[in-house]
Image: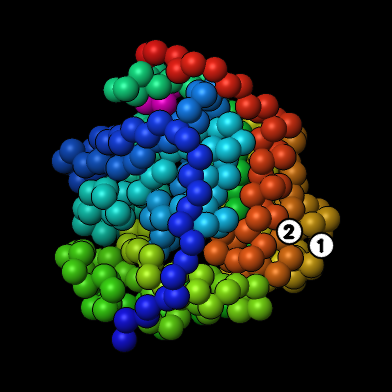
Amino acid sequence: MTVVPAPLPEADTPPCVGEDLTVHVPVDGTDRHIAGRLLVPEQGADTVQVLIPGLTYDRRYWTLPGAYDYSAHMLRAGYAVLLLDRLGTGASSRPHGDDVDLDAHAESIHQAIALLRSGTPAGHRFSRVVSVGHSYGSGIALVEAARYADVDGLVITGMLHTTTDFYEKVDKVHDFFHPANQDPLLAGLGAPAEYLTQRPGRRARMLEFAGGIDPELSAHNELIKSTATWGEGNSLPETYRPEHSRAVKVPVLVVVGEHDALFSSSDVGFAARSEAVHAFERDYYAPEAQLETHVVPGVGHSLNVHRGAAEFYDLARDWFDRRFAAVRGPFRPA
């Protein structure tokens, strides 16, 4: 059955300049690409945020309706944003699912960051690049930063170095996922057989806290679901290895929801207090990370779809302003 949500307000995107980007990356011996859209405040920006969605999301996670639009919030704050479809999602290439893994993602994000620093085809160039990830996208951001040391900061959301019992159940993929080509919403994509998505009705249980989300946003969250691949699932444990996070030598902000069904475990006091999460996570990061950690109350795994999203956005903006005060000016030609 198709879910039809109630009408939602349009995003109030501030004046900006947009540029569609295609970043080529070799996968499975062929030339593949990831697709993105760069948005730059009309007055220019010196810092760009690379927004990396998690499993079963694409760039739409960062452009939710109305006040839930993370990208619009940051544009108003004076920061450029690069909205990306991970390899295998959205307008990006869909190779064999076994080839869509952590290594391929880290390389593709590295190439995107290099383009932002050297200059895009339209002449946008940035001196400061910060990766902002959600869930598996946070793991990609950590591994990419550890391998290439090419970012000035990281925002890690929906990911800790501990997991819940529910996470172990999710690991039994057949209980929560089915092939995307069998899904009522995604069958038309023609995705390869190794591409999966949540079964109807299971997405909310994994990603949302019912007490903190409006029904319209929950329905919208179902409608924007994307895919995950076998390669991503197999490489997921690699993202939690402490040698990656400890190799990051730039400022890091970690934000997690109080009711994250995947990460709010007893190890972190069930994320009731930011202090407990910080005490657990700090040993996984180098002193140079100057780690800051926050718990958003009343929020599940996918922070952006909850009513508490505004609190997360304000936390992130404050962190950016303190670490990378928005520098506005004319576009710097490449």
Residue 309 falls in image quadrant: bottom right
- The percent position of residue 293, horizontal first and vertical second, equals 74, 49
Location of residue 236 with respect to 108 vertically, above or below: below
Residue 257 falls in image quadrant: bottom right
Depth check: 323 or 238 in front? 323
Q: Do the residues labelled 1 and 2 touch (CB within 8 Å)?
A: yes
* Residue type, numbered disc 2: Val
- The percent position of residue 244, horizontal first and vertical second, equals 56, 43
Q: Which residue lies furthest to the top in this view?
A: 333
Give me the C-alpha separation between circle 1 and circle 2.
6 Å
Q: How crowded is mark 1: few (under 14 residues within 10 Å), some or many (20 or more)?
A: some
* Magenta span includes 115: yes
Residue 139 visible in the displayed image: no
Residue located at (17% from left, 65% from top): 190
Q: In the rendered structure, which segment of residues is drawn in magenta?
A: 113-117
Depth check: 151 or 249 in front? 151
Q: What element carries label 2?
A: strand
* Magenta span includes 189: no
Residue 58 visible in the displayed image: yes
Residue designated by label 1: 273
Q: Residues within 10 Å of mark 2 (few under 14, many from 20)?
A: many
Count of labels in the image: 2
Of the numbered discs 1 and 2, the one sitting upstream in the chain is 1
Left or right: 124 in relation to 147: left
What color scheme is it? rainbow
Residue designated by label 2: 295
Residue 224 falls in image quadrant: bottom left
